[in-house]
Image: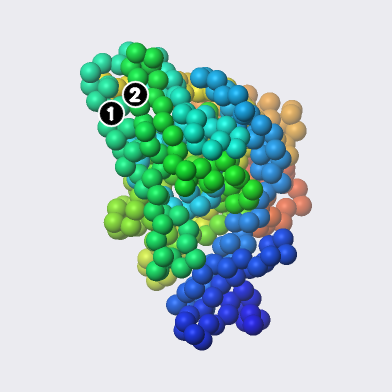
């Protein structure tokens, strides 16, 4: 019988462990056995949260699947959105930036109900841009294919402490310099987590993913997309490391924050995300991080990061199509300012530095408003008062 205080948990006397389970669509799903009741209950809460797909994602998936998993895949696929099971996001693997991009482009080439017998073909131009590839470039491509071929994924098992199921991500990878393509297959064991997307899946925008400049940001992109519908979402620091850089990297949280967390979120906020964090402490140490996440579906044209193969440490990005003032206008509309007020703000604060400061200053207010963590009688008036306080020039203009 389930414990009424911590529903979904029961003690198994024979095993001497706590079992976690929850009901979905009238069926009971087991989550395995745990050493403590609290661990079992945390697993129950996590499973329930992850099973709640947002209405927006559900609607997008209905539109995406016919094209994303098209029955007739051409060499240059035009799909804007890709998807993968949350199981894969929860089972991170180490990748370079080029390997991450190749994974995205292979994912884009899947077809509906693909049994895995059709080779996925990716044009080299989609992977590295239109630049010529020299000898050093081909060596880097070979290394990326070697790295992708070596990736092994832990798939879920009833008892993670005893059972084992690790499978390759991809196989039979091929670089054809004459045709200008890279091709390969996803492994048969992984295919259900890429094509049979019934629940617990996450969508990603190809244009976003191909513009990202850091492999850490790639990991955070998928995590933020997965967590956005249950924002604010709190994650233990140890779990955050496991999901992004691995347990052994940056053991000091201050170093992790400086080198991974802040740069990744800053890059995502340049896209269509608006993310802020709250650090929860136990004593003097940060124990967990609370993410406040909002995302506006991409309205930009495709913008591809070019990977210069001659100088792999340098990354060049094509300029964004939408100027800064459009982002400011979008932000102020969310805060219920009128079009006349928005026009005045942009006129009084014309520089990019001022507009960047505005976006940064108004972000916490927007998070409070959208998450309803703080009541507002007049969010537009509150936003105007914030702008007056932050920008003396604007205060004088509306005085």
> Residue 392: x and y, percent?
57, 36
> Residue 203: x and y, percent?
58, 40
**Which residue lies at the image location 46% right of the left edge and 29% below the top edge?**
119
Residue at the disc numbered 1 = 142
N-term mark: 2 or 1? 1
**Badge 2 element:** strand
Quadrant into which the N terminus falls: bottom right
**Which residue lies at the image location 76% right of the left edge and 52% below the top edge?**
377
Answer yes or no: do the residues labelled 2 and 1 have beta carbons within 8 Å?
Answer: yes
Q: From the viewer's perspective, is residue 17 above or below residue 376?
A: below
Q: Is residue 130 left or right of residue 67?
A: left
**Which residue lies at the image location 62% right of the left edge and 62% below the top edge?**
48
Q: Label 2 neighbourhood size at 10 Å, few (<14), some (14-19), many (20+)?
A: some
Q: Is residue 174 left or right of residue 371?
A: left
Residue sitting nearer the eye, 274 or 225: 225
Q: From the viewer's perspective, is residue 17 above or below residue 371?
A: below
The colour scheme is: rainbow
**Which residue lies at the image location 71% right of the left edge and 56% below the top edge?**
375
> Residue 80: x and y, percent?
58, 28
Quadrant into which the C terminus falls: top right
Q: Is residue 189 left or right of residue 322?
A: left
Task: Choose top left, top right, bottom left or bottom right for residue 49.
Answer: bottom right
What's the CA distance linking mark 2 and mark 1?
Answer: 8 Å
**Badge 1 element:** helix
Task: Choose top left, top right, bottom left or bottom right for residue 391.
Answer: top right
The circle on residue 175 is 2
Residue sitting nearer the eye, 368 or 246: 246
Residue sitting nearer the eye, 267 or 363: 267
Q: From the viewer's perspective, is residue 254 above or below residue 1?
A: above
Q: From the viewer's perspective, is residue 259 above or below residue 62?
A: below
Task: Choose top left, top right, bottom left or bottom right for residue 149.
Answer: top left
> Residue 277: x and y, percent?
50, 52
């Amino acid at each position: 019988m389930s414990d009424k205080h911590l529903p979904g948990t029961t003690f198994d006397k024979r095993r001497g462990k706590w079992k976690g389970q929850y009901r979905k669509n009238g069926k009971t799903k087991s989550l395995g056995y745990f050493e403590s009741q609290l661990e079992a209950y945390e697993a129950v809460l996590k499973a329930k949260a992850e099973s709640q797909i947002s209405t927006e994602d559900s609607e997008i998936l209905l539109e995406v699947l016919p094209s994303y998993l098209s029955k007739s895949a051409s060499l240059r696929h035009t799909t804007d959105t890709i998807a993968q099971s949350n199981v894969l996001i929860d089972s991170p693997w180490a990748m370079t930036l080029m390997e991450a991009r190749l994974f995205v482009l292979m994912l884009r080439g899947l077809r509906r109900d693909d049994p895995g017998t059709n080779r996925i073909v990716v044009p080299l131009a989609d992977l590295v841009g239109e630049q010529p590839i020299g000898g050093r470039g081909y060596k880097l491509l070979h290394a990326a294919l070697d790295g992708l071929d070596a990736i092994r994924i832990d798939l879920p098992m009833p008892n993670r402490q005893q059972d084992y199921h690790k499978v390759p991500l991809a196989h039979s990878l091929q670089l054809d310099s004459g045709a200008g393509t890279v091709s390969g297959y996803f492994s048969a064991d992984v295919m259900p987590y890429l094509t049979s997307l019934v629940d617990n899946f996450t969508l990603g925008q190809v244009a976003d993913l191909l513009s990202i400049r850091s492999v850490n940001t790639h990991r955070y992109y998928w995590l933020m997309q997965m967590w956005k519908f249950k924002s604010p979402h709190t994650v233990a620091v140890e779990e955050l490391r496991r999901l992004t850089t691995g347990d052994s990297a940056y053991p000091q949280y201050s170093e992790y924050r400086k080198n991974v967390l802040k740069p990744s979120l800053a890059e995502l906020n340049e896209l269509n995300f608006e993310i802020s964090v709250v650090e929860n402490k136990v004593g003097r140490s940060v124990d967990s991080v609370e993410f406040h996440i909002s995302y506006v579906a991409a309205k930009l044209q495709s913008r591809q990061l070019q990977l210069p193969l001659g100088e792999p440490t340098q990354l060049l990005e094509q300029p964004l199509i939408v100027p800064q003032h459009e982002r400011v206008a979008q932000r102020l509309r969310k805060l219920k300012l009128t079009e006349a007020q928005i026009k005045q703000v942009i006129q009084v604060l014309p520089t990019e530095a001022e507009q960047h400061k505005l976006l940064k200053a108004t972000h916490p207010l927007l998070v409070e408003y959208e998450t309803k963590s703080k009541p507002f009688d007049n969010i537009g008036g509150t936003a105007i008062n914030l702008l007056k306080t932050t920008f003396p020039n604007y205060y004088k203009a509306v005085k």
